[in-house]
Amino acid sequence: MKNILIILPSIRCGGQEKVALKTGKLLSKYYNIYLLVLFNGEEELNTQDLNVIKGKNITGGTLIAKILNYLYLIMQISKIKKDKHISVSISFATAANLLNITTKRH
């Protein structure tokens, strides 16, 4: 069975989050689905039946902290893709899309 990674910035009650979770739940009948939540926060939506991976972030509002956090997330996503043998990764929102493209496998 193939492994699919869905990358989201958060699990708040927004439109893209609802679409991502619905997509993950529909695909979970046929594939192993991993849901990576980049930025920690309160979960407002039901993630039952999905393998949720919470991103670890470097805190701080300075420019240097944001750059370090971005680089750390690149390493973290690359490791998840390798360790979980991800065949396809789907991302939602600009930040997740940039990280997904940056960590593409050849």
Image: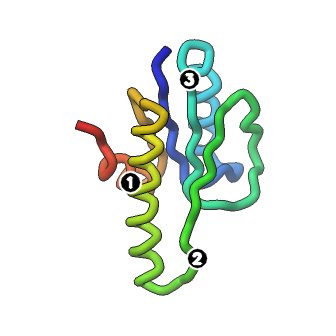
42 lies left or right of 4: right
Label count reads: 3
Q: For this rendering, which residue is in front, 104 or 26? A: 104
Q: Residue at x 48, y 45 (%)?
A: 92
Q: Tell me the distance, in whole angstroms, between the alpha carbons under discs 1 and 2.
A: 18 Å
State the mark number for residue 59.
2
Earlier in the chain: of badge 2 and badge 3, it is: 3
Asked if 69 appears above or below 96 in the picture, the reply is below
Query: Which amino acid type corresponds to the residue marked 3 in the rendered image?
Result: Asn
Estimate the x, y position of residue 75 in percent, counting from the top left.
Answer: 40, 56
Q: Quadrant of the C terminus?
A: top left
Q: Which mark is residue 32?
A: 3
Q: Secondary structure at mark 2?
A: loop
Report the front residue among 15 and 89.
89
Q: Secondary structure at mark 3?
A: strand
Residues at marks 3 and 1, CA–CA distance in whole angstroms: 21 Å
The residue where tag 1 is placed is 99
- Residue lying furthest bottom: 62
Type of amino acid under label 2: Thr
Quarter assignment of residue 88 = top left
Query: Who comes first in sequence, dot 3 or dot 1?
Result: 3
Q: What residue is shown at x 30% (from left), y 43% (from top)?
A: 104
Alpha carbon separation for disc pair 2 and 3: 31 Å
Amino acid bearing label 1 = Leu
Which quadrant of the view contains residue 74? bottom left
Kindly give the residue lying farthest to the left in the view shown: 106
Tell me where residue 86 appears, x and y as whole percent.
43, 31
Frontmost of labels 3 and 1 is 3
Q: Quadrant of residue 50?
A: top right
